[in-house]
Image (spheres, rainbow, N blue to C red):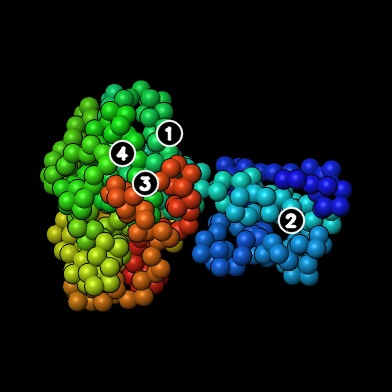
Amino acid sequence: MQTDESSPMGDMTVPTTDADALAAQIDAEEPVVLLDVRMRDEFETWHIDGPAVDAINIPYIEFLQGEVPPSASEALPTDAQVTVICAKGGSSEFVAAVLADAGYDVNHLEDGMQGWARVYDRREITAHDGPATVYQYHRRSSGCLGYLIVGGDAAAVVDPLRAFTDRYLEDAAAEGADLTVAIDTHVHADHISALPALSAAGIDARMSPGALDRGVTHAEIAPLEDGETISLGDAAVEAVATPGHTTGMMSVLIDGSTLLTGDGLFVDSVARPDLEEGDAGAEPAARQLYASLQERILPMDAETVIAGAHTGGQAPPAADGTITAPLGEIVSRMPILTADESAFVTEVLREMPPRPANYQQIIDINLGADRADDATAFRLELGPNNCAASTDALTSS
């Protein structure tokens, strides 16, 4: 950022914090005061939150005179550090300088919300019972979840993101395994898939026939049939067709113990059914989702670990920090799962949240009907995923 002697920056160096450090503070439930200086609609669409986070929104334009506005004087503590956040890092540096000059203990988030979008945690699902070691990836900014399955000297990745393609290869190698298989549970609407890049690197890329039938044209991707089992050493990865969110939705059962449900069933909600066929096709898709849940997922053992492709942040993490829960626990807190078909469809279709940002363009890129360079792809993914139905009427307190 360019500065001169008349700007709030002057020769001042404003302290920064990076996204990983901020994530560690939030995980430790340390009190964190965040001043988000983006416009209110941007803040309300998506922002950083947590159990001990005080997120305050005061737009950057209120600081343009180089002085602390009354709104900030009233809202900001004088006895705690304030971390300033913007979209990319420039505006937050300016505001942090204004606050520092006024005596506040302040820093700003390096690269802003774009830096936050690069945080990609990995945790082991310790409740998994079987020869595989299963890791869950969590993209904090959007709630996207992916998985690395390691069995002996082979590994598979499920629902990988293009922005983190190299990460999967590196993590598999660190586990002493070769990444041999990459699976997408469906054609995603909220992030750009890594399957084409991994396929180009020689990885066996797989999707359900229903997903491929939508017109995937830009990569060598082979069908993953319902009931097909892929072996990773002694570990078994089985495909379970669960259409509803999309016609090609496929869940992945690992060692008969952990079910990666994609966007079919989440730990705190069920899938929205309107992203493939639009409003006109939402009701039949919801009926298809009901059948998948009742016939394919709910009959599984109550101890089956459910691990979806997204989280909206409503449910607390498991003891190991992953966004997972036993099937029986989910059923007990989600009455919608034991409702009849008519009630299920009514509640799922009621008050669905806004569709994910740029969802149609992202779908087109994942099908191969559109193209995007890495920078454009990353920008398209910014924001919440919104792939679940509203949780308001689906869960019990």
| Side of 360 relative to 229 (left or right) | right
Disc 3 versus disc 1: nearer the observer: 3
Q: Is residue 392 visible?
A: yes
Label disc, if present, on residue 196 of the rendered structure? 4
| Labelled disc at residue 345 | none
Residue occupied by mark 1: 167
Q: Secondary structure at mark 2?
A: helix
Q: Residue at x 31, y 25 (%)?
A: 178
Mark 3–mark 4 CB contact (< 8 Å)? no
Going by the numbered disc 3, the residue's amino acid type is: Arg
Residue 371's disc number: 3
Residue 168 location, quadrant: top left
Please determine whether, in this image, residue 120 is positioned above or below residue 78. above
Of discs 3 and 4, which sits in the foreground? 3
Query: Dot 2, how many residues are within 10 Å of its Cα: few (below 14), some (14-19), or many (20+)?
Result: many
Helix, strand or loop under label 3: loop
Residue topped by disc 2: 95
Q: Dot 4: what SS?
A: helix
Q: CA distance from mark 4 to mark 2?
A: 41 Å
User: Mark 2 touching mark 1, by CB under 8 A?
Assistant: no
Q: Nearer the viewer, mark 2 or mark 1?
A: 2
The disc, 4 or 2, on the residue closer to the chain's N-terminal end is 2
Say which quarter of the image contains residue 397.
bottom left
Whole-number angstrom distance, CA of label 3 to CA of label 4:
12 Å
The residue mark sitting in front, 3 or 2, is 3
Q: Compare marks 1 and 4 and give the one earlier in the sequence.
A: 1
Residue 305 can be seen, yes or no: no
N-terminal-most mark, 3 or 1: 1
> Which callout, 3 or 4, points at the residue further toward the start of the chain?
4
Say what amino acid the circle numbered 2 marks: Val
